[in-house]
Image (cartoon, rainbow, N blue to C red):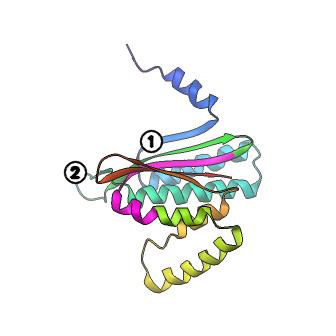
């Protein structure tokens, strides 16, 4: 007998406006597959192209953050492939707007780098974000390093309001990082 009531879970997700939820290991193939399905779903629902592109772009940025920074990982036994990072991604609709929400375990050190960037972005208007994006792009070209925050800036620029985020302490070394953008 199955103890987990999948129907209840399905009804709960639907009641919360969640149209897509994925939790587990994330690879480039998973990103492409989910992305294609997400695009199809929005086409079927006649979502306007601008909104659809923003949702897709934010989805990709958030998945890339999981792939780049999740502290939860699976290392294939044959070691032929790289490690696969683990996280959760949710796409939903509330109050007539889409939202993309993701979460994953990150190091406390990464949290201390990310938090000030996100706090700064929540205080900026769209023009200030545009200027910051240009500056960081130039910086990224010259340094060829991750961590310039371009992804977060891009998410914040495409969101209709301030991005929401949280860092839930897990232990002294790790936190569960959550970020939400409404489109």
In depth, the one of 123 and 127 nearer the eye is: 123
Residue in the picture at 57% in, 40% down: 20
Dot 1: element: strand
Whichever of labels 2 and 1 marks the residue nearer the N terminus, that label is: 1
Q: Is residue 66 left or right of residue 130?
A: left
Dot 2: element: loop
What residue is pinned by disc 2? 77
Task: List x then y, in percent, for residue 121.
Answer: 59, 65
Residue in the picture at 55% in, 48% down: 101
Q: Quadrant of the N terminus?
A: top left
**Structural distance between the alpha carbons of marks 2 and 1:** 21 Å
What residue is pinned by disc 1? 23
In depth, the one of 78 and 107 nearer the eye is: 107
State the residue lying farthest toward the top: 1
Q: Quadrant of residue 13?
A: top right
Task: List x then y, in percent, for residue 6.
Answer: 49, 23
Q: Is residue 9 left or right of residue 78?
A: right
* Mark 2 nearby-residue class (10 Å; few <14, some 14–19, many ≥20): few
Circle 2/circle 1 CB separation < 8 Å: no
In depth, the one of 157 and 40 nearer the eye is: 157
Check residue 126 for magenta coloring: no
Give the label on residue 174, or none.
none
* Mark 1 nearby-residue class (10 Å; few <14, some 14–19, many ≥20): few
The magenta segment: 98-114
Residue 22 vertical position relative to residue 164 in the rendered view, above or below: above
Residue in the picture at 65% in, 67% down: 124
Q: Quadrant of residue 109?
A: bottom left
State the residue lying farthest toward the bottom: 142
């Amino acid at each position: 007998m199955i103890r987990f009531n999948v129907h209840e879970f399905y009804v709960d997700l639907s009641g919360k406006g969640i149209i897509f939820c994925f939790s587990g290991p994330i690879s480039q193939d998973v990103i492409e597959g989910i992305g294609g399905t997400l695009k199809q779903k929005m086409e079927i629902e006649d979502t306007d192209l601008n909104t659809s592109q923003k949702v897709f772009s934010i989805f990709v940025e958030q998945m890339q953050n999981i792939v780049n920074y999740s502290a939860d990982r699976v290392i294939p036994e044959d070691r032929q492939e790289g490690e696969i990072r683990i996280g959760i991604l949710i796409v939903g609709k509330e109050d007539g707007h889409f939202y993309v929400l993701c979460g994953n375990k990150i190091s406390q050190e990464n949290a201390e780098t990310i938090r000030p960037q996100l706090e700064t972005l929540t205080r900026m208007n769209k023009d200030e974000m545009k200027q910051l994006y240009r500056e960081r792009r130039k910086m990224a070209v010259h340094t060829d390093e991750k961590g310039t925050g371009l992804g977060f800036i891009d998410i914040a620029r495409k969101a209709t309001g301030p991005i929401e985020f949280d860092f839930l302490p897990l232990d002294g070394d790790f936190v569960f990082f959550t970020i939400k953008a409404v489109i």
